[in-house]
Amino acid sequence: MISKLKSQPWLWMSVRVLLSALVVGMILHYVPLGQLWAALGRLPPTLWFAVLGAYLLAQTVGMLKWRMMVNLAGADLSYVQAARCYFGGMFSTLFLPSAVGGDVVRMSLAMREARSVTGAALASLLDRLIDFAALALLAGAGVILLDGAISPTSKHVLWSVAGVALLAAIAGLAAIAFLPARRFPLRVRRLIVQLRQSWKAVLAQPRYVALALLLGVAVQGSFVLLSKFVADFCGLHVPMQGWLLAWPLAKLSALVPLTQGGIGVREVALVALLTPFGAQPVLTVAVGFVWETIIVGSSLVAGLLSFVLRRVRTADDAPRGPRLRRPLNPRARMVLREGHD
């Protein structure tokens, strides 16, 4: 049954939309609707547009961070090309189960325009890992600032989850670095060698990786601030330490590909995470719904921007002949030619 759904994307999307509607319906069933609408009514429309503008500005910083990473790996994307790919991927999250699906679309678009296909792919993956690291740092900061406000068992669970995620990321990167290329056919061997060269190109400039991490923390931190700002207007007053802990974990939970764009999952996670801080579930749900409208609105703007930028032609879009992969160094050529690793 699952394989049949996956072979028919529109049917699979319909199932996710149905699950989203089911989760939202259950939420609306259990919260007082009068209090929910009252909380939503406290947010002026002008303020909503201001939050939308701030969210788009933060996403623009995220686009610049992503462009820096893929260009370090040899993609050689212009600002216009990077914006087309980044905002195109952002728009696609409306139709995919999570932000990870949008990353795949963004990476696919970049691979069409990049000079180094493998560089664009690897750097896009690394950029997402940096975003995960930024979320983990924010959640860790929340745990440290809360100190005795949460139980030792909860602390242990949080640090264990962070440790497992870190080990998984290290294992994936180690596989690229140490996988024996000689055991694979020539085509796969070339891909492995290209990935390693792109990886080394990125690591050769660690200051830019550190800068990307700082930008990731700034972008994700701005989302936390915007969420708290919206919450204060809706009547939900939770200390910043609570938001630093709850918001990143709720965002990570929304990556689970069960509902459309994580709708419903994020709200349930926020309720569970903020209730220990005295947050009323109905107010938490109101904030979650407002944030969903911000995500949908910004994705629509991103799609329009990507569409307009596709009509903008730059020197980088001129035909360049056959696209070349990153030139192989002598060691890489030896691996391909002789099959030695």
Image (cartoon, rainbow, N blue to C red):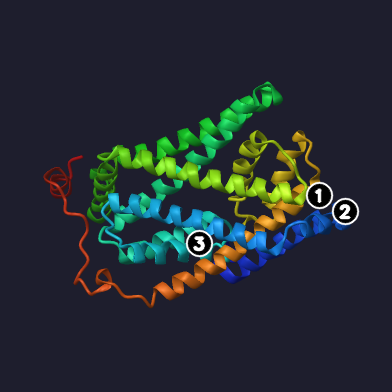
Residue 32 circle label: 2
Looking at the image, residue 143 lies above or below residue 219: above
Residue visible at 72% across and 61% down? Answer: 44
Looking at the image, residue 231 lies above or below residue 321: above
Could you tell me the amino acid type at mark 2?
Pro
Residue visible at 44% across and 38% down? Answer: 169
The mark total stands at 3
Of residues 246 and 177, which is closer to you in this image? Answer: 246
Sooner in the amino-acid sequence: mark 1 or mark 2: 2
Residue visible at 39% across and 50% down? Answer: 65
Of residues 253 and 226, which is closer to you in this image? Answer: 226
> Horizontally, is 136 left or right of 329 in the view?
right
Of residues 164 and 253, which is closer to you in this image? Answer: 253
Residue 239 horizontal/vertical position (percent)? 69, 36
The image quadrant where one finds the N terminus is: bottom right
Task: Find out whether the residues at labels 1 and 2 contact each other: C-beta distance under 8 Å.
Answer: yes
Q: How crowded is mark 2: few (under 14 residues within 10 Å), some or many (20 or more)?
A: few
Could you tell me the amino acid type at mark 1?
Val
Could you tell me the amino acid type at mark 3?
Met
Sooner in the amino-acid sequence: mark 3 or mark 2: 2
Q: How crowded is mark 3: few (under 14 residues within 10 Å), some or many (20 or more)?
A: many
Residue 214 falls in image quadrant: top left
Q: Mark 1 points at which residue?
A: 282
Sooner in the amino-acid sequence: mark 3 or mark 1: 3
Residue 250 horizontal/vertical position (percent)? 64, 45
